[in-house]
Amino acid sequence: MTKKIKILYVITSLGIGGAERLLVSYLKLLDHKKYEFNVVALWEKPDDLKKEIEEYCKVMVLKIKSRFSPSVVFHLAKLIRQTKPDIIHSHLFQARFYTAFAHLISNYGILITHKHNNVNPKKHNVFILLEMISIFLSKQVIAISNSVKSSLCKFELISSKKIFVLHNAIDYEKFFKIAASNKILIGKPIVIGTICRLEPQKGINYLLLAMKIILTKFPTVQLEIVGDGSLLQELKELTGKLGISNSVKFFGKFADVIPFYSRMNIFILPSLYEGFGIVLLEAMSAGIPVIATNVDGIREVVINGVSGILIRREDPEAIADAVFKIIENPQMADTLVEAGLERSKSFDIKEHVMKLDNFYSNLLGAESSK
């Protein structure tokens, strides 16, 4: 009987986010006859995915009290010695940092890390230095886009040879099932939507300012914002100051976003910077015309004027103008939808997992040949 390859995934938390959802897909789609999985999370969140992940493997939560605690390194090192993984695959900053030093102490397995967003050069120098050290101690880095790879090379001086680009992916069929429900119909209220973390990076304040303009021309349009974050209260207050509270709904964070996509007619992501923009793929595969800012990672997802409309960042007027184009030109909207469906199909999760499987095999093969 062939011995299974042991994979230990270490992630900051199991909250409902892109990295966490990707991890669930790995556990679901990678061959359980070939791999044996364990998952370690640094801390719990009340709405986390622990129960879902436990359907596939054992989950260990450290429940650390402080985000920066040296004892975490030793707890992780102990777990690494106990599980004896062939590959340790970390996700997100805190997990990447702690795992790098725990691996150094335990000296088990091959360490790789997954980078889910562009390096933000405005971050404190200490943050960037810690990440540089963490990546230096890793065998390889998986970047979710060429944009992320470029930012790692530019701002953290990581060798391009150390970076493997594996574009983020979606369950295309899951979203395509609702594609017919999103067409703009005469007499039916138009719903503009976005799904994201409510953090400065996402630029939702510019979307609210754009909504003020949109309502002057189309007063029945509704804006639905799905997500949570540090700016929630501030954005609600801005909505009130703009006098658009009756036209904007905040729904918080949901594990199942399909019901929200099913009633959106236009999807907008006004990010200031973006490593990839997986929600744009979800929206396109659900048959929704998309508008997004013309920033690095998004350009790898949306082809401007073909599968969506790209606009200047921090520009409410540009957002409003793009919305007007889609509402007033149904034929153009249909063309964007058709191209978006075709574009998003090339980012299906099954293909992504096959590439990851090959990456793991090549990594182990290269190590064993030394």
Image (cartoon, rainbow, N blue to C red):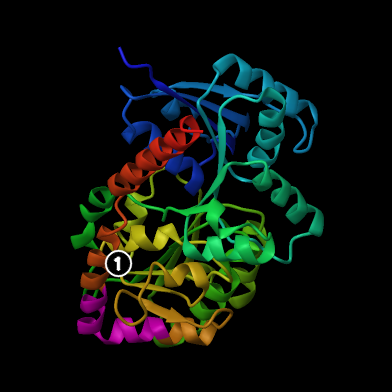
* Residue 170 left/right relative to 149: left
Q: Choose between 364 and 255: the one closer to the eye.
A: 364
* Residue 258 against residue 263 in the figure, above or below: above
Q: Position of residue 53 (x, y in %)?
A: 44, 28
Q: Secondary structure at mark 1?
A: loop
In the image, residue 212 above or below residue 354: below
Rendering quarter of residue 71: top right
Residue beneath the point at 67% across and 63% down:
120
**How would you rate the neighbour count of disc 1 (Cα within 10 Å): few for under 14, some for 14-19, many for 20 or more?**
many
Residue sticking out furthest to the top? 1
Whether residue 323 appears in magenta in the rendering, the answer is yes
The residue pinned by badge 1 equals: 288
Task: Residue type at mark 1: give it.
Answer: Ile
- Residue 342 seen by the camera: yes
Q: Which residue does the image show at 46% across and 69% down from the upper left? A: 298
**What main secondary structure does the magenta stretch of the protein show?**
helix
Residue 26 part of the magenta-drawn span: no
State the residue in front, 359 or 78: 359
- Where is residue 188, by image quadrant? bottom left
What residue is shown at x 73% (from left), y 66% (from top)? 122
Image spot of residue 211 (x, y percent): 49, 77
Please state, as top left, top right, bottom left or bottom right, where the N terminus lies in the image.
Answer: top left
Which residue is drawn at the image coordinates 75% and 48% (left, top)?
130
